[in-house]
């Protein structure tokens, strides 16, 4: 239960601050309107760092089913232990999206672009090609797992207090380098929970929730996390044995 609550709160903060940055840039008459991708990528990087700081001392601050699955793959977590992590992440992501909706309440009606409303909850590709979008999510999440496992490796001598900050920098870097094609979900909960919220909430002038694309930011990160975990294990097999 402790891990469930920690992951719920951490993922709620992640989505509130991350999607809050997206809404700030995309919604009409917001103070941050049209401030651009750098603001969004920075917002997500800081959101990850703050969320990991909040939840990390209890659960390790996974705040992402892909990270949790990666820890299962390297033997750091059992599937049974992972269940409260992933369930907490999904619930927290949904609640975080609802809080973004509440925080920007007057702006939904003033925003004419229905795509921008959807993007304030979940990801959409810049060029829709599900096969290529899937590959992008796999690559980006593999890099995420490689970075997270490296940051947490005691051989690198990184102090635990700076770890969450470095994970935030990692997500910022991924956003700057690999976020353009898909909006870099790299986290099934971060995309699916808010997508469900978009579907359920009474948002004026909203479009459909793009369920035909929704499998990409779910399966792509899952495959990517397994690939990243495998590559990290391969490094240890090659250099430590």
Image (spheres, rainbow, N blue to C red):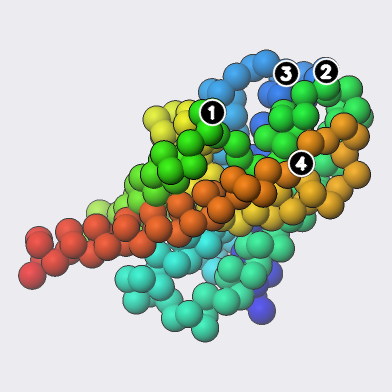
Front label number (4 vs 3): 4
N-terminal label among 3 and 1: 3
Image quarter where the N terminus lies is bottom right
- Residue holding disc 1: 126
Q: Are marks 3 and 1 in contact (CB under 8 Å)?
A: no
Whole-Å distance between the Cαs marked 2 and 4? Answer: 23 Å
Whole-Å distance between the Cαs marked 4 and 3? Answer: 23 Å
Where residue 179 appears, as percent x and y from the top left, is: 47, 33
Q: Are marks 1 and 2 in contact (CB under 8 Å)?
A: no
Where residue 3 appears, as percent x and y from the top left, is: 60, 73
Q: Quadrant of residue 203?
A: top right
The residue drawn where x is 32% and y is 58% is 227
Q: Does residue 237 appear left or right of residue 140 in this picture? A: left
Whole-Å distance between the Cαs marked 3 and 2? Answer: 6 Å
Front label number (2 vs 4): 4
Count of numbered badges drawn on the protein: 4
The image's mark for residue 33 is: 3
Q: Are marks 3 and 2 in contact (CB under 8 Å)?
A: yes
Q: Work out whether residue 209 can be spotted.
A: yes
Front label number (3 vs 1): 1
Q: Work out whether residue 169 can be spotted.
A: no
Question: How would you rate the neighbour count of disc 1 (Cα within 10 Å): few for under 14, some for 14-19, many for 20 or more?
Answer: few
- Residue holding disc 2: 29
- Residue holding disc 4: 208
């Amino acid at each position: 239960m402790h891990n469930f609550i920690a992951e719920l709160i951490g993922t709620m903060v992640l989505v509130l601050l991350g999607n809050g940055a997206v809404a700030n840039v995309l919604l009409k008459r917001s103070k941050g309107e049209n401030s651009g991708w750098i603001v969004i990528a920075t917002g997500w990087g800081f959101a990850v760092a703050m969320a990991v700081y909040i939840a990390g001392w209890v659960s390790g601050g996974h705040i992402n089913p892909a990270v949790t699955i990666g820890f299962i793959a390297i033997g750091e977590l059992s599937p049974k232990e992972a269940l409260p992590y992933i369930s907490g992440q999904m619930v927290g992501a949904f609640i975080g999206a609802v809080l973004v909706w509440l925080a920007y309440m007057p702006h939904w009606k003033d925003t004419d672009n229905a795509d921008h409303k959807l993007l304030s909850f979940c990801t959409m590709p810049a060029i829709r090609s599900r096969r290529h979008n899937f590959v992008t999510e796999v690559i980006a999440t593999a890099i995420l797992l490689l970075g997270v496992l490296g940051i947490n490796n005691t051989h690198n001598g990184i102090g635990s207090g700076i770890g969450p900050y470095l994970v935030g920098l990692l997500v910022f870097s991924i956003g700057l380098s690999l976020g353009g094609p898909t909006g870099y979900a790299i986290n099934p909960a971060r995309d699916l929970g808010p997508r469900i919220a978009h579907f359920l909430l009474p948002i004026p002038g909203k479009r459909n929730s793009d369920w035909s694309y929704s499998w990409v930011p779910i399966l792509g990160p899952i495959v990517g996390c397994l690939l990243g975990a495998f590559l990290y294990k391969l490094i240890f097999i090659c250099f430590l044995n």
